[in-house]
Image (cartoon, rainbow, N blue to C red):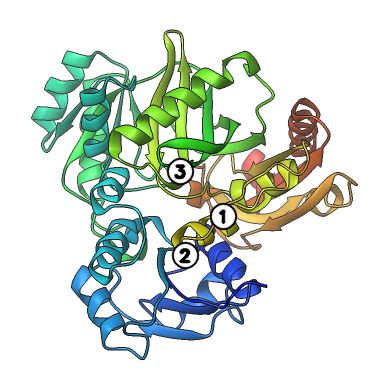
Amino acid sequence: MTTAKTIAFVEPSFYGVSFARVAFEQGHRVIAIVSSEENPKKYGYEGIYHDLIVADIRDEQSLYQAITESAYAGKLDALIPATDYASHLTAKVAERLGLRGVTYEAALKSRNKDLAREAYAEHGVPSAKFRKVKSFEEAAAAANEIGYPVVLKPTNCASSQHVFFINDEAELWKSFNAIVDFKVTYMDFKVREDYLIEQYLQGPEFSVELFLQNGDAVFAAVTEKLTTPLPYFVETLHTLPTPSHIGRQDDIIRVAIDALRAIGLTDGPSHVEVKLSPSGPRIIEVNGRPGGDNISSDLLVLAFGVDIFEATVHFYLNQPVGIEKKHVRAASIAYVTAERDGVLERIEGFEQLLQHPNVIRGHISVAPGDNVTQAKSSDDRLAYFIVASDTPQVAKQLALSLLERVKVVYRNQEAVIA
């Protein structure tokens, strides 16, 4: 019988809702620290928390003060970030409160891609050539030095927001003008005015789902990713475990662990994105949290019976962390995207595919009459469904074949075609 603890989560949202659910179902007292009292309804965790504390989650002192002036001052057993954007601030506040967690420096590097790239270079972790830039002139010089094609991206954002594939200086000029106008990201966090010009890495893409203790992996699994055609990088299919390049899994995992050690993330969950380039695995980015896109909430559970969120709650409570594969199967999640901009009439064939015996569930996030766009970031995806099977090869092929049966129908499509 688990002794009930008091656990505060900073802004549960997206993958972070699973943290609140696990803690609530374990019988702990769940406190949500939120920027608005409307957020439990907005992010879908009504009924799985006990109390709210309202604070400016973008400000360390506001978070600290909200806790110390609440009824839970001195009574929290854990303080856990439940959104990427507040992870470094949460780490700092946890340090001030004397609670267990990831170090502030490690969380800061995992949130800021330039700091992470500098750490990889310092520790000899293979990643992409890069330059941090503030102006178009600096960006153009960096691109010429690295060599086209290059990638331009913000240093502190997520979900492929304003990530540009660039072939020449004319494209760089257009993209740089767009990125400097991008001032605010999710939850009103400011976009830093430092940007990265990076070498474009060739090769298939993977993520590594990890849980470290004292710098060593107690759990590791490799997920294969498929993305939209260039010039965008939106993820459209995840398969766990990977059905391809199976003989390179150990190399991919090793580089991911080296990257985590380089930035000081030696304990807890992480989601590391890797390209298998012709010269070997190279780091795209590190996230000091469980994988989103339903990888941790669904695919890990279906494939291995592993609950990373439960293990993470135990880590923050300084309790024994047990992560053991209960079975070995496979799962895929496929995303429906629009091939062009328009007004949605319907997503044809989606309800029928949900009847397939291997489809676990699905969700449509748009409605008839909504404006839809060619996917430029994860926010532009229209729907998803999850399949399970005995092998990753079958799971992937089934997901792709079902995806081919789905058609995005646009309003007035016949008129447009005519």
Question: Label 3, on which residue?
Answer: 213
Question: Label 1, on which residue?
Answer: 311
Q: Earlier in the sequence, mark 3 or mark 2?
A: 3
The residues bearing labels 3 and 2 have C-alpha atoms spaced at a distance of 14 Å
Q: Amino acid at mark 2?
A: Leu
- Local crowd size for mark 2, using a 10 Å CA cut-off: few (<14), some (14–19), many (≥20): many
Image position, residue 162 (x, y; %): 34, 42
Question: Label 2, on which residue?
Answer: 317
- Local crowd size for mark 3, using a 10 Å CA cut-off: few (<14), some (14–19), many (≥20): some
Q: Residue furthest bottom?
A: 71
User: For the point 51% across and 74% down, which residue is it?
Assistant: 42
| Quarter of the rendering containing residue 92 | bottom left
The residues bearing labels 2 and 1 have C-alpha atoms spaced at a distance of 10 Å
Image position, residue 383 (x, y; %): 65, 52
**Quick check: 92 left or right of 247?**
left
Say if 144 sits above or below 326 in the image.
Answer: above
The residues bearing labels 1 and 3 have C-alpha atoms spaced at a distance of 11 Å
Image position, residue 18 (x, y; %): 58, 63
Q: Amino acid at mark 1?
A: Ala
Q: Amino acid at mark 3?
A: Gln
| Quarter of the rendering containing residue 222 | top right
Whether the residues at callouts 3 and 2 have beta carbons within 8 Å, the answer is no
